[in-house]
Amino acid sequence: MDLTLFGEVFVTLLVITDPPGMMPIFLALTGPLPARERNRAAWQAVALALGVIVVFAVAGQTLLAYLHVTLPALQAAGGLLLILVALELLTGKADDPDQQATANIALVPLGTPLLAGPGAIVATMLFVQRAHTSGAYAQIAAAIVAVMIAVWIVLRFSGAIVRILRPGGIEVLTRIAGLLLAAIAVQLIADALAAFVNVYAHRA
């Protein structure tokens, strides 16, 4: 059985979701929470990301066309969402556990747009467009699930790092994660603007 497509999808999505890079952001957002809430946030984020990616894999082109939304617009929206979260991390507003809502953190920004962001969505849609047999679709589906399992494992066992870092270390990590998240957000918006300029330049 040729598993080339499986390997290609798995590696591509694993690089895009970047579980090691997600860990400091996940810890910054969930560090003050109890272990049970942090673990729940991990599986909720992964479950939502899986759902979003599957929906866009199956009906992404149709959905975006119906809403008259382009991929760069989706990318810019994701960037704006991340900027809001980054500002909370940088200003310390995300540090108070009383202000934290586990479900909200798991859904936004962890589930989307960090895990199921424009990069993962676009890559999945492109792979689906290339597939023409049931075996190819099965390989893509298996690769998506495998990536989500890998992400969940990394996030699930990040609690050990929380115990090592202690509150002071988590606070430093939060500020660093906020800066990284702001950079990711700016890059998303910049890429979206570049795509818009490209489109209008071709039209002209």
Image (cartoon, rainbow, N blue to C red):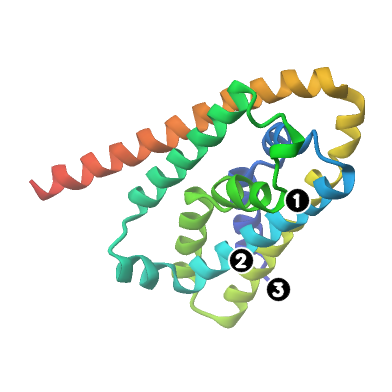
Which amino acid does the dot numbered 3 rest on?
Met
Between the residue at mark 3 and the residue at mark 2, the CA separation in whole angstroms equals: 27 Å
- Quadrant for the N terminus in the image: bottom right
Label 3 Cα neighbours within 10 Å, binned few <14 / some 14-19 / many ≥20 = few
Discs 3/2, front: 2
* Left or right: where 69 falls relative to 46: left
Is there CB contact under 8 Å for labels 1 and 2?
A: no
| For marks 1 and 3 on the same chain, the one whose residue lies earlier in the sequence | 3
Disc on res. 41? 1
| For marks 3 and 2 on the same chain, the one whose residue lies earlier in the sequence | 3
**Label 2 element class:** helix
Using the image as rendered, state which of residue 71 and residue 39 is in the foreground.
39
Between the residue at mark 1 and the residue at mark 3, the CA separation in whole angstroms equals: 37 Å
Using the image as rendered, state which of residue 98 and residue 181 is in the foreground.
98
Which amino acid does the dot numbered 2 rest on?
Gly
- Residue 117 versus residue 68 in the image, above or below: above
Residue beneath disc 2: 51
Q: What residue do we see at 80% from left, 54% from top? A: 40
Residue beneath disc 3: 1
Discs 1/3, front: 1
Please say whether residue 147 is visible from this viewpoint. Answer: no
Percent coordinates x, y for residue 168 in the rendering: 82, 17
Percent coordinates x, y for residue 170 in the rendering: 78, 24
